[in-house]
Amino acid sequence: MKCRVCRGPAVIDLRRHNANFCPEHFLDFTRKQVEKAIDDFEMFGPDDRILVAVSGGKDSLAIWDLLLDLGYQADGLYIGLGIGDYSDVSGRHTRAFAEAKGATLIEIDLRADHGFDIPTAAHATRRVPCSSCGLSKRHLFDSAAVEGGYDVVVTGHNLDDEAAVLYGNVLTWQADYLGRQLPVLPARNGFPRKVKPLVRLTEREMAAYCVITGIDYMIDECPMAVGNKHIAYKEALNLIEEQSPGSKFTFYHGFLARAQERFAASSGDGTDDRPGLRTCERCGSPSSNETCAFCALTDKVAGHEPVPVELIRPRR
Ligand code: Q46
Ligand code: ZN
Ligand code: ZN
């Protein structure tokens, strides 16, 4: 197996590109894919201050690394969710990466800073853990970006993630979600801009990037994700990809190029433009009620006796 560029020994084959790469040219390939996504979707410019939402997994550490490497001003934000060993280990990987790169890492600990963790919130609200987790992460990323004066929040969603979300939305014809499924969500109404520069790269490519660059990442999935529909959609798409390399890319990027706008016409432009949006009287965040969803969640769960992660079964 020879590298497409230099004919040296290749370490990875990318069937969808009909190409093999040596480590050096694979890293070039990933950088170019990220630069193309940033340019094509006008995600941000060289002077923008970027806040990367980092979980300690391969995707978020890889995009942080890539952005630093490309010369962007990118700080990291890590949220300690209190999901047992998973959170402890992912926090350690994130801190070790930031230290090794001399990068700025902002940390928020749900339990220490807001009086609850995700297992306790799931138990107290009797809802799936991902519901309070997603709500908390969105709120904390938004407010940290606004308070820190960042221009944009970057997340590590890759092509597999976005194709799986699209697959789920198509299976159930979620027209509103389809109209909003874009790799760039513009800033609006006090919410920062959010972008996904890894939409041209797959999960396997990001794992390879971390192995080649020596990034030590959290390999285990969140224990709350077990049985997740999102994982089942990814597996289904992997089967199709196996038969027909490039399908995942064509599915997602073909949707963006040829279909997304048709759904956007009926569902707005993807921004939170709700009439009557006001300010949460507790934390000052944009909210449609007097108290925002995060402050309401905090009220409900912060006084609750801590519930260990082992007691929570992921339910969908
Ligand atoms: S961390 Fe949180 Fe995910 Fe775990 S509880 Fe669900 S949403 S699965 S990205
Ligand atoms: Zn090469
Ligand atoms: Zn609030």
Image (cartoon, rainbow, N blue to C red):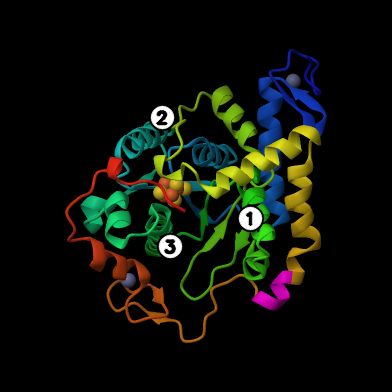
Looking at the rendered structure, which numbered label has been put on residue 142?
Answer: 3
Label 1 CA crowd tier, 10 Å (few <14, some 14–19, many 20+): some
Q: Which residue is mark 2?
A: 100
Q: Residue at x 35, y 38 (%)?
A: 91
The answer to whether residue 89 is above or below residue 249 is above
Residue 109 visible, this angle: no
Instruction: Name the residue at 73% across, 44% down.
Output: 248
Marks 3,2: beta carbons within 8 A = no
Could you say which disc has been placed on residue 16 in the image?
Answer: none
Residue 281 percent location from the top left of the image: 29, 79
Residue 204, x across and y down, in percent: 63, 32
Within 10 Å of the Cα at label 3, are there few (<14), some (14-19), or many (20+) other Cα atoms? many
- SS under mark 3: helix
Q: Amino acid at mark 3?
A: Asp
Please name which of the two marks, 2 or 1, marks the residue nearer to the observer. Answer: 1
User: Spatial distance from mark 3 to mark 1, Cα to Cα?
Assistant: 25 Å
Per the image, label 2 sits on a secondary structure element best described as helix
- Give 88 or 167, whichever is nearer the viewer: 167
Residue denoted by label 1: 168
The magenta stretch spans which residues? Answer: 263-267
